[in-house]
Image: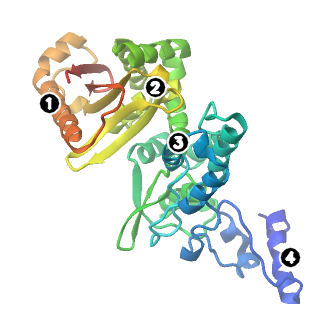
């Protein structure tokens, strides 16, 4: 970016070309306008068009186009079209680049990856998420390590949506480190990288959300590293614990690993921890196993169900039990007694009333959700509640159907 550097020289050459009439028009595509403020006069002839209403569907695939592609390749002869459309909606759809647009678009690469595999192999790909997409995890990690704290990143991920946000048209590298607009600039960068997209709008206020299941998996990959899942349990132990949960309706082993992860957090300098953290830790365990389809915070008029685990379409034979789980957290300041000195049984006895209260709240939320949503399938649905005491003890309870 220095005076004779490549980027500044490149923009200056374009500007000179337009002045001479050699270049009539310029259209540049990329991932973000992050450096334009540093280019100074070399870039002052450009207009940022990324968020223009008329261009919303330009670099994605519309739902009508997805249907056209499926019909062209006659994929309904291999896999039922309705099921395939649901997969595309869950894994590839959700992008919106203007707050006034109602229709979202599909990620082109994600759609073509799945279609190519079905056309060539006559079946679903072994993994519905392209490994090439996972290279974006490195970008997410770099942003987290360079521009925000782990706590800030987890806060963004666990809340499900962030905002209100002013999406910036241009910003420079320095503004990601400091200044009043640092938060807005970091969120804008995540938006331009496709890690967030436009969600709800309130007047001139914009909320950002994670667009689809594929991008969520990048976040879960990041969280599994932050929570050091691999240090709390060997992969084979985690896989076995999840298998007994999926096939034998036994949650004791996975809850032992879950408690181990939380215990490790208590000895580290991670001040940010709340109810959403309790849920996201369990999500990372289910994601690492890779068999369940993870639905987090499915909205109902009676509130939210924290976590719903169901069979993934390509691993149905490995899932006998679905699960609906509600998480609650009791802060250390809300507990009676010294959590670091008392045994689990002693602390549990002292705080039995607040534990029962949290369990009751969790049960009510699960019941409300069951009334509002149809979760009937060909797998057995089981429910349980999880109450985390501080960052040390875990109380869980299975609910009879």
| Secondary structure beneath label 2 | helix
Q: Nearer the viewer, mark 1 or mark 3?
A: 3
- The spot of residue 182 in percent (x, y) is 51, 59
| N-term mark: 4 or 3 | 4
- Residue at 66%, 70% in the rendered image: 37
Q: Quadrant of the N terminus?
A: bottom right
Closer-to-camera residue (273/204): 204
Q: Nearer the viewer, mark 2 or mark 4?
A: 2
| Mark pair 1, 3: CA separation | 42 Å
- Residue at 49%, 64% in the rendered image: 181
- Please tell me whether residue 271 is drawn above or below residue 201 in the rendered image: above
Per the rendering, the mark at residue 360 is 1
Residue at mark 3: 80
- Residue at 53%, 44% in the rendered image: 84
Closer-to-camera residue (251/374): 374
| Secondary structure beneath label 4 | helix
- Please tell me whether residue 352 is drawn above or below residue 253 in the rendered image: below
């Amino acid at each position: 970016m220095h005076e004779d550097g490549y980027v500044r020289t490149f923009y200056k050459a374009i500007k000179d070309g337009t002045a001479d009439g050699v270049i009539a028009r310029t259209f540049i595509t990329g991932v973000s306008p992050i450096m334009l403020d540093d280019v100074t006069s070399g870039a002052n002839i450009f207009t940022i068009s990324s968020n223009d209403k008329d261009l919303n569907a330009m670099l994605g695939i519309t739902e009508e186009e997805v249907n056209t592609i499926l019909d062209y390749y006659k994929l309904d002869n291999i896999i039922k079209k309705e099921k395939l459309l649901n997969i595309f909606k869950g894994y590839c759809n959700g992008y919106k680049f203007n707050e006034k647009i109602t229709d979202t678009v599909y990620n082109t690469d994600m759609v073509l990856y799945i279609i190519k595999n079905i056309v060539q192999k006559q079946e679903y790909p072994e993994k519905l998420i392209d490994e090439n997409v996972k290279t974006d995890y490195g970008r997410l990690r770099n942003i987290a390590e360079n521009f925000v704290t782990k706590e800030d990143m987890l806060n963004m991920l666990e809340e499900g949506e962030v905002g209100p946000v002013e999406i910036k048209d241009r910003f420079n590298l320095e503004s990601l480190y400091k200044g009043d607009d640092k938060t807005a600039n970091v969120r804008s960068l995540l938006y331009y990288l496709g890690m967030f997209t436009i969600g709800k709008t309130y007047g001139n206020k914009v909320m950002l959300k994670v667009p689809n299941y594929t991008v969520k998996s990048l976040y879960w990959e990041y969280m599994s590293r932050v929570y050091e899942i691999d240090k709390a349990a060997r992969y084979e132990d985690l896989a076995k614990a999840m298998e007994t949960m999926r096939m034998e309706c036994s949650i004791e082993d996975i809850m032992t690993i879950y408690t181990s992860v939380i215990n490790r957090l208590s000895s580290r300098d991670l001040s940010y921890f709340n109810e959403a953290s309790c849920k996201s830790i369990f999500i990372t365990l289910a994601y690492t196993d890779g068999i369940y389809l993870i639905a987090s915070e499915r909205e109902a008029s009676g509130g939210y169900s924290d976590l719903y685990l169901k069979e993934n379409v390509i691993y149905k034979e490995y899932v006998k039990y679905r699960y609906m789980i509600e998480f609650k957290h009791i802060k250390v300041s809300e507990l009676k007694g010294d959590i670091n000195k008392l045994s689990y049984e002693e602390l549990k006895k002292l705080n039995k009333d607040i534990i029962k209260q949290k369990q009751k709240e969790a049960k009510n939320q699960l019941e409300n959700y069951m009334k509002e949503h149809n979760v009937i399938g060909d797998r057995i649905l089981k429910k349980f509640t999880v109450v985390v005491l501080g960052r040390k003890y875990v109380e869980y309870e299975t609910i009879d159907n």
